[in-house]
Image: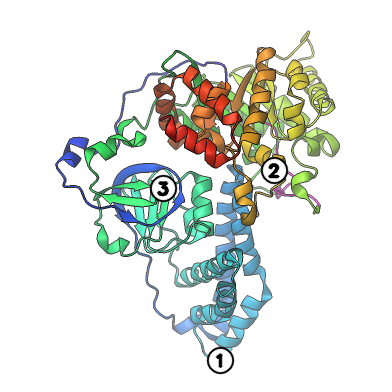
Amino acid sequence: MPTGPTRRRPSRRFPTWSIATLASSPPRPALRGIAAAPGRVVAPVWRWNAARLGPSSGGLSGAEGVDQLGRAIEQVKIDLATKTARLQARGLTAEAGILEAQTLMLDDPVLLDGASELMAQGRPADEAVAATMAPFAEMLRASPDPVFQARAADVEDVVEQLRHALHGVSATPPPPPQPSILVARDLAPSQTAGLDRALVLGFATEQGSATAHTAILARALGLPAVVGIAGLVEAVEDGQAVLLDGDAGTLVIDPPADAVAMVPQAVEAATDAEPAVTRDGRRIEVGCNAAGLDDAQRAAAAGADGIGLLRSEFLFLGSDRLPSEDEQVTVLDAVATAMGGRPVILRTLDVGADKPLPALPQPPEANPALGVRGLRLQLLRRPDLLLDQLRAALRVSSRHPLRLMFPMVSTLDELRQAKALLAQARRDVNPSAVDGTGMPVGIMIEVPAAAVGADVLAAEVDFFSLGTNDLTQYLFAADRTNPELAPLADSLHPALLRMIDQVVKAAHRRHRWVGVCGEMASDLRAVPVLVGLGVDELSVHPPVVARVKALVRRLDAAECARAARAALRLDSGAAVRRLVERRGLR
């Protein structure tokens, strides 16, 4: 991403207690659990005890109980829809599917009919719900297949959400009073999806597994997590300093200063607006992924160099009508203003049958990930929507450094059709304009055909951004929503690295720059390899901006290039990770 103005912010160290304090603490053995989500973080403990719900009584039975259960079901569905929309807005479509499956359970007539029958016999509503659903959870848990075992936790999660709704109590942990590591006996998937990521820096639990949906969500959200630590809740105290290591699966109470010093987020500023320049002088732009004004404000506060991916879907969520061109201009203006002159890359609407919008329903498809989605949808079915977006973007770009990016481009013909619509939009906005728009145009490289054809596409655009989540899925033909195929979707596999290498070389031959806006950019084990492959920009989650910048400054680009060339010759993602560790590039 081209360089924008750099703003200096006062350095703020985190956590608030000092390393010197820790140095006086005697070392304690690490509590061992299961590594559920990677990353290391040091912060105070915040213990959360789920509300203990007593048996309901009074109106929660009989006909009145049936009515209350109906209202509770609707309330939980609304809460799940909100969390699902947030995940989808962050591009976590597969993870959003976990909550969508829970919504389907709520729609199953077996739930209401079974519970109603028990309530007619005098059972309280929450007991009736639990009794109705328990056989399904038990059946799934008894399965030898870990995929079905994980579904049992989802059934129990739905039951607990309903019980809490019936009692008028929130099932989601409240935000801690300060940035903390959440410690609990267990966390359900819906609770994990509702965590305030600005204040919950990671979590540890007594129960859980690395294949459970809670762990999958933690990894998707970039939350370090360790699960399965026996006796955890009694072993720690609120406010006690701990080092959570989601790579090793450990939790260290009162960690020694030398261990804290090895944790990047403990010694680096949480806000970092300084440029990320390698030791040998190569600058890497570190932007943020965003899905709305709140994200833009967090990106600006984190010191991001810009927004590397603004998902325009947020303009269409939460409404049953499509936003007008003027409404889009108003919101985009606010986002760009929040970034204070730093560049913002707007991705045009990226939806399809796999993530339909209320105002833009799509017919079901047998293979929605391979169907009419992204740019295809607008070119084939709704060019009017794309024209609205393009006109809005052009109007905003006259006041702010806005760039435009088309998703799901597979062929040169698609790109040229989109650019023709952009030219039409330019004429609509400014009929007297002579040529061009002045707004840089790029494409997401997320389809193998685009990666292989990067040399041709580079002649037609100003930049590429690698959507590594989808590119990995399509490259390995491995559905991101299928946990059994998760080992295949390895973003550090040399096959993907070779594809990235090909894209970067094709772009640089045309003097185009290349960014990465997939989850890979936030993976500290992948950053040295990406720098070594020549990537120019990383677009990450706001909480990891400072960590990624700090890592880049510790790297030597030439050394990273040698490591990347070695990685291209390896045979697995695990071998690449060992290479990064062996060369001390983290």
Secondary element at image label 1: loop
For label 1, the crowd category at 10 Å Cα-Cα, with few meaning under 14, some 14 to 19 and many 20 or more, is few
Quadrant in the picture for the C terminus? top left
What residue is disc 1 on? 121
Instruction: Give the residues drawn in magenta, as a range.
Output: 347-363
The amino acid beneath tag 1 is Gln
For label 3, the crowd category at 10 Å Cα-Cα, with few meaning under 14, some 14 to 19 and many 20 or more, is many
**Res. 386 visible in picture:** yes
Q: In the rendered structure, which disc, 3 or 2, sits on the residue that comes first in sequence?
A: 3
Secondary element at image label 2: helix
Secondary element at image label 3: loop
What residue is disc 2 on? 476
Q: Indicate the position of residue 553 as horizontal and vertical percent values.
A: 41, 22
User: Residue pushed farthest bottom?
Assistant: 121
Of circles 1 and 3, the one toward us is 3
Q: Which residue is at the front of the view, 447 or 442?
A: 447
For label 2, the crowd category at 10 Å Cα-Cα, with few meaning under 14, some 14 to 19 and many 20 or more, is some
Q: Which mark is residue 262?
A: none
Q: Which residue is at the front of the view, 516 or 56?
A: 516
Q: Which mark is residue 246?
A: 3
- Above-or-below relation of 272 to 169: above
The amino acid beneath tag 2 is Phe
Image point (72%, 49%), residue name:
354
Q: Indicate the position of residue 422 as horizontal and vertical percent values.
A: 77, 22
The image's colouring method is: rainbow
User: Residue pushed farthest left?
Assistant: 24
Image point (71%, 41%), residue name:
474
Question: Does residue 479 appear to the left or right of 54 in the view shown?
Answer: right
Image point (38%, 29%), residue name:
271
